[in-house]
Image: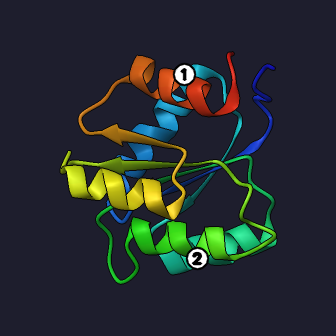
Amino acid sequence: MSVDMNMNVLIVDDYKTMLRIIENLLKQLGFKNIHQATDGSAALKVLREIPMGLIISDWNMQPMTGLQLLKEVRADDKLKPTPFIMITAESKTENVVAAKEAGVNNYIVKPFNAETLKQKIAAVLGSF
């Protein structure tokens, strides 16, 4: 299975610089349709309007965390199958466990580079 580079990808982070960095990395990898949201509620609004092939979300955001967003996505029958990758600066075991229990597909610890992002996406979506 190969990755569709034209699929919609949603990046969620409350830090605009991080959004820009991740978008640039995704573009380097060949993704074309990248959408952004600055918090979980904004992300849900976008997700309900545009079908996404992948969600990449930061863990630490206000007012809705990445974990809360993940739970909302998994609780929604329409959004449930969407692959979800969580990004965090903390590699706490309990966070990884909580994200796994909530249905995350993969986990990236900051800092990371294009190669790490590519490997994590490939593990979720297939090679590209």
What residue type is disc 2 on? Glu
Does residue 1 appear to the left or right of 43 in the view shown?
right
Relative to 4, residue 59 above or below: below
Q: Position of residue 52 (x, y in %)?
A: 74, 54
Answer few, some or many: residues within 10 Å of disc 1's Cα (few below 14, many 20 plus, some between 14 and 19): few
- Give the label on residue 106, or none: none
Does residue 117 appear to the left or right of 9 in the view shown?
left
- Give the label on residue 28, or none: 1
| Residue at x 21% of width, y 48% of height | 89
Q: What residue is pinned by disc 2?
A: 72
N-term-proximal mark, 1 vs 2: 1
Residue 58 seen from this side:
no
Residue 25 seen from this side:
yes
Q: Secondary structure at mark 2?
A: helix
Does the CB distance between marks 1 and 2 fall below 8 Å?
Answer: no
Q: Position of residue 17 (x, y in %)?
A: 32, 50
Which image quarter holds the N terminus? top right
Query: What's the CA distance linking mark 1 and mark 2?
Result: 30 Å
Nearest the eye: 111 or 107: 107
Q: Position of residue 19 (x, y in %)?
A: 42, 50
Relative to 91, residue 115 above or below: above
Quarter where residue 35 is shown: bottom right
